[in-house]
Image (cartoon, rainbow, N blue to C red):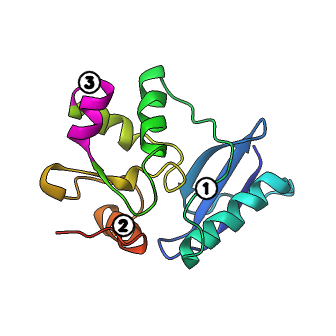
Amino acid sequence: MPFISLNTPVGPLTIFAEDDAIVAVDWGWPPETDEPPGPLLERARDQLEAYFAGTLTHFDLPVAPMGTPFQRKVWAAIAAIPFGKARTYGDLARELETAPRPLGGACGRNPIPIIIPCHRVLGMNGSLGGYSGMDGIDTKRFLLELEGVSLP
């Protein structure tokens, strides 16, 4: 599977593509490969770099996260949360007519973090809740502050 890696303020990230869509963003570096990344992965890298530089507020990339129909429904709702805004697990659960716990489970299984911005989902009263990315809550806090979200 083709990929491209980059250094970011939240650690090294590797972006994976399959069938002309982004399918995963993982923390860390994969083994070296001779396979060229291709234009989609280069565009994804450029957009992530622009996001971290503060010049990009909306990712314009085809994504195809692998998951259950429920998980894909949750990830679509998360992807609709605008830059600089946050929603609570409870709000999203009501919107999707589910309970907060399974919604939180889907957030934690998001295979394309940052691009599908699960960091924009907060617990009750603005608490940070959890985050599955490198350094957990510290990474979530950094991403929210980067976007200008006011935190308690």
Is residue 92 inside the magenta stretch? yes
Q: Secondary structure at mark 2?
A: helix
Residues rendered magenta in the picture: 88-99
Residue underneath mark 1: 59
Q: Secondary structure at mark 1?
A: loop
Residue underneath mark 2: 144
Q: Along the horizontal axis of the image, is 94 left or right of 74?
A: left
Residue 98's disc number = 3
Q: Along the horizontal axis of the image, is 134 left or right of 18?
A: left
Categorize mark 2 by other alpha carbons within 10 Å: few (<14), some (14-19), many (20+): many
Please tell me which of labels 1 and 2 falls first in the chain: 1
Residue 98 image-quadrant placement: top left
CA separation, marks 1 and 2? 16 Å
In the rendered structure, which amino acid carries the disc numbered 3?
Answer: Thr
* Quadrant the N terminus occupies: top right
* Quadrant the C terminus occupies: bottom left
